[in-house]
Image: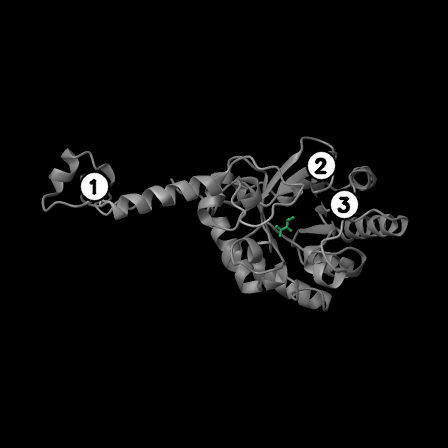
Amino acid sequence: MAPDASDPELRISAGAIRLRKGRVPVVCLTAYTYPVARLLDGHVDLLLVGDSVAMVLHGHKTTLGASLEMMIAHGQAVIRGSARACVVVDMPAGSYEATPRQAVASARRIVGETGCQAVKLEGGVTVAPQIAAIVAAGIPVMGHIGLQPQSVESDGGYKIKGRTEENVAALYRDAEAVEKAGAFSVVIEGTVETVAADLTRHISIPTIGIGASGDCDGQILVVDDMVGLTVDRVPKFVKQYADLRSVISQAAASYAAEVRSRTFPGPGHVFSAAADKDKERGGQRMSGDKNEWGQR
Ligand code: KIV
């Protein structure tokens, strides 16, 4: 049965995530589509419609390929596919950096058109005015510090943060700025383990780690990495809990072989002139007046 996505009472709120600081770890995954949101909703506390969607589903080289329209379309699908998880939608590059006013307008559009619980944006000190303005407009914000994928081109690549004294000091300034601006939680990405653990102890909002520390208040992974669907290089910090690449590839090979040998479609996958004949064959999804086409 499709989840009742319309009842906000059923959802874990951003405020409830905020209260998890130092308690039971916050379980987060990215989700970009309706079916995946349906599969994950019962297992996680928070679903992030990350701008990683531009790379993972749309084949862009970086997250800079994400647009506001793309994020809204995927946000709507994830909201439709979930009923319980707190859904956070990423603000894409170019939608918030210019001014707090631009950030509020984009955040309002994302929340208004998707019904998500919060937005996420990358940066610390430099975007603190944007975070404060969005929060003042009544929209919860998740921060994102450490390695920031929207800045990899200007940063000269995917560089781990927290390896120099200067960099550690900047991370502290960013974490404090995001906390002070009113974010309900903050993602710490690609940061030296001990630094991420210390930052977690230093600030009062939950830290969500990715390539960070087991001491963070929660963890997040890109779902396609976690289930082994990623076709290119998988980052070191990812643990693969399944190998869906092999499953899909084997299924496609079996299908191709059966089509070529004319063993698919078999008798159970075609329609006869009389509807009851299909029933006799046990083709459940093919029979019945309303559902003969097999629609769910
Ligand atoms: O876009 C994304 O998927 C993210 C996570 C990696 C935190 O920002």
Judge depth for marks 3 and 2 and give the one in front: 3
As drawn, 42 above or below 60: above
**Circle 2 — which element?**
loop
Tag 2 residue: 217
Tag 3 residue: 191
The x, y position of residue 255, in whole percent, is 32, 44
- How much space separates mark 3 and mark 1, taking CA atoms? 54 Å
Residue toward you, 18 or 226: 226
Identity of the residue drawn at 44% across and 45% down: 35
Q: Classify mark 2: residues with Cα within 10 Å, few (<14), some (14-19) or many (20+).
A: many
**Circle 3 — which element?**
loop
Give left or right: position of 138 versus 240: right
Q: Classify mark 3: residues with Cα within 10 Å, few (<14), some (14-19) or many (20+).
A: many
| Residue 296 visible in the snapshot | no
| Residue 223 visible in the snapshot | yes
Give left or right: position of 197 versus 210: right
